[in-house]
Image (spheres, grey):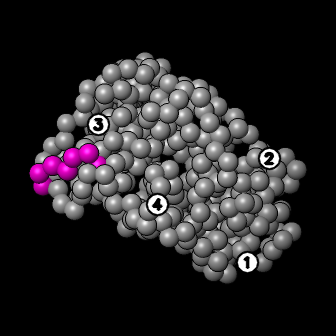
Amino acid sequence: MRAVVADNGRLDVREFAEPVPEAGEILVAVRACGICGSDIHTLAHGDEVASLGEALGSDTGFDPALPYVLGHEFCGEVLDAGAGTFGFDAGDLVVSMPFLLRPSGLVPLGFANAAPGGYAERMVLTGGICLKVPNGLDHRRAALTEPMAVALHAVNKSGIKQGDAAVIVGCGPIGLAMIPWLRLRGIEPIVAADFSAKRRALALELGADLAVDPRDEAVTDAWRRVDGAKELVIFEAVGTPGMIDSVVSMAPSRARLLIAGVCMPPDTFRPFVAIVKELSMQFVYCYDGDEFAATLRAIAEGEVVVDSLITGTVGFDGVSEAFRLLGDPEDHVKILIEPGSGPEVLHVST
């Protein structure tokens, strides 16, 4: 099959071994797969990703020196539901949490050499954790189930409730994806901050009450200007060294900090500042099966609208260019790979 193959820090479109479903697995044709920031980081810093996995005691069989196929934000069309699978017919659209459940253990799709992800024509999924796409939802919106579930998990772990206020530091895909969930819970005000004018405009479109350029006004000062009285939850969604210390410094006393930005290098902050302010800090990473299913349902029923997050589509031959374009926050937020599309990155109007 054709796939976008990561090999020694480069992306090449070439033939890759066909995935063979084991018992309890289904074979799907990939209809759409989102490009995630973690894909871009893994391509550039594969050795670092592998070493961090080892430090966590996770042996996923990932060797960045060998070819692999990225892609964990996907929607597929069932081609064959094999032995031990139930309730799926050819032609069904499905999504899944991005891993395989195999006798050897959990195998992450897109981050293991033997488990190609969604940057390919076909992939195999564990039938027991696949979800049918409901309500005639199209494949593009369905492919956003995974990143939207990451955002839902962050909001859930924050413990935010009606009567609280929210500040979002960083309007990348995950920071932006938190806004509809916060709005759905009746949180106000929601104040977002980003250097990018395009990202600030998207934050407002998705439901933020205010979006500021941190070069002009600190986001917590903006919160004080429009509210300043409610209990505050600050969502850090940047993930670069120094950001945790920055958020600790700007936070008011007794604020809750939710750290969703994925910072790979070692980092430091000043505990004494957090101690004196009596800050609460929660780190988050992924989601559970209930949150994943709830996300698909909310998208399908229109409770959260994700259209604004999808800014472009591209075929296999344009993925390298898409990686480059995603480095400019004024250009794109989320680009979806659609196998069979042309090499040009096409803007999606919202």
Identify the secondary structure beneath mark 2.
Answer: helix
Of the numbered discs 2 and 4, the one sitting upstream in the chain is: 4
Say which quarter of the image contains residue 220: bottom right
| Residue type, numbered disc 2 | Ala
Check residue 197 in the rendering and tell me which mark sits there, or answer none.
2
Alpha carbon separation for disc pair 3 and 1: 47 Å
The label nearer to you, 2 versus 1, is 2
Q: What stretch is highlighted in magenta?
A: 78-84
Q: Quadrant of the N terminus?
A: top left
Where residue 298 sits: x, y (%)?
A: 49, 68
The label nearer to you, 2 versus 4, is 4
Alpha carbon separation for disc pair 2 and 1: 27 Å
Does the stretch in magenta take in 83? yes
Of the numbered discs 1 and 4, the one sitting upstream in the chain is: 4
Of the numbered discs 2 and 1, the one sitting upstream in the chain is: 2
Rendered residue at 22%/62% (across/down): 87
Does the stretch in magenta take in 117? no
Q: Give the left or right position of residue 80, taking residue 83 as reference.
A: right
The label nearer to you, 1 versus 4, is 4
Of the numbered discs 4 and 3, the one sitting upstream in the chain is: 3
Rendered residue at 45%/51% (across/down): 139
Is 93 drawn above or below residue 68 in the view shown?
below
Is 280 drawn above or below residue 193 in the view shown?
below
Check residue 115 in the rendering and tell me which mark sits there, or answer none.
3
Label 3, residues with CA under 10 Å away: few <14, some 14-19, many ≥20: many
Alpha carbon separation for disc pair 1 and 4: 37 Å
What residue is pinned by disc 1?
A: 230
Rendered residue at 64%/44% (across/down): 348
